[in-house]
């Protein structure tokens, strides 16, 4: 039996799934996890489309969203806007 490599981007096919995935990673993950998740979402939507909407080149996006990358906050904000996301702060429960 042949198996294929799991790619989360294959399952991020709606705004609801994207939001749920990113919120889970924001809640449970670290900085690197969040950057990787944003990269998965950008890949699911299409890097060319994200590049056009952010004004960044595709190679710059791949580099900024790769494992171990430390993109500038402005880059993350541009990509979040392009993927249809926003940052919202809610008080934490004690």
Image (tube, helix red, strand yellow):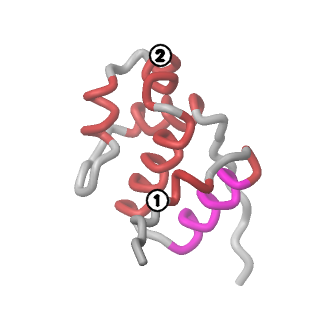
The residue lying toward the viewer, choosing from 51 and 74, is: 51
- In the picture, the disc for residue 60 is none
Q: Quadrant of the N terminus?
A: bottom left
> In this rendering, is residue 66 above or below 22?
above
Residue 24 screen position, x and y as percent: 62, 67
Alpha-carbon span between mark 1 and mark 2: 24 Å
The residue lying toward the viewer, choosing from 6 and 32, is: 6
Which range is magenta? 17-28
Question: Mark 1, residues whose alpha carbon is within 10 Å: few (<14), some, or many (≥20)?
Answer: few
Q: Nearer the viewer, mark 1 or mark 2?
A: 1
Reply yes or no: does residue 54 show up in magenta: no
Identify the residue shown where x is 25% and y is 38%: 63
| Element under disc 2 | helix
> In this rendering, is residue 37 above or below 63?
below
Identify the residue shown where x is 46% and y is 59%: 7
Numbered marks: total:
2
Reply yes or no: does residue 27 show up in magenta: yes
> In this rendering, is residue 59 above or below 3?
above
Chief secondary structure of the magenta span? helix
Identify the residue shown where x is 40% and y is 32%: 75
Q: Quadrant of the C terminus?
A: bottom right
Quadrant hosting residue 51: top left
Q: Name the residue under label 1.
A: 7
Q: Name the residue under label 2.
A: 52
| Element under disc 1 | loop
The residue lying toward the viewer, choosing from 2 and 44, is: 2
Residue 71 screen position, x and y as percent: 31, 41
Residue 38 screen position, x and y as percent: 48, 48
Identify the residue shown where x is 69% and y is 49%: 88
Q: Which tag, 1 or 2, sits closer to the chain's start? A: 1
């Amino acid at each position: 039996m042949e198996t294929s490599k799991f790619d989360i981007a294959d399952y991020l096919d709606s705004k609801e799934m994207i939001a749920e995935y990113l919120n889970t990673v924001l809640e449970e993950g670290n900085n690197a996890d969040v950057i990787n998740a944003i990269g998965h979402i950008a890949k699911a939507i299409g890097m060319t489309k994200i590049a056009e909407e952010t004004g960044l080149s595709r190679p710059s996006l791949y580099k900024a969203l790769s494992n171990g990358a430390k993109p500038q906050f402005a880059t993350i904000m541009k990509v979040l806007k392009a993927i249809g996301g926003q940052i919202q702060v809610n008080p934490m429960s004690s």
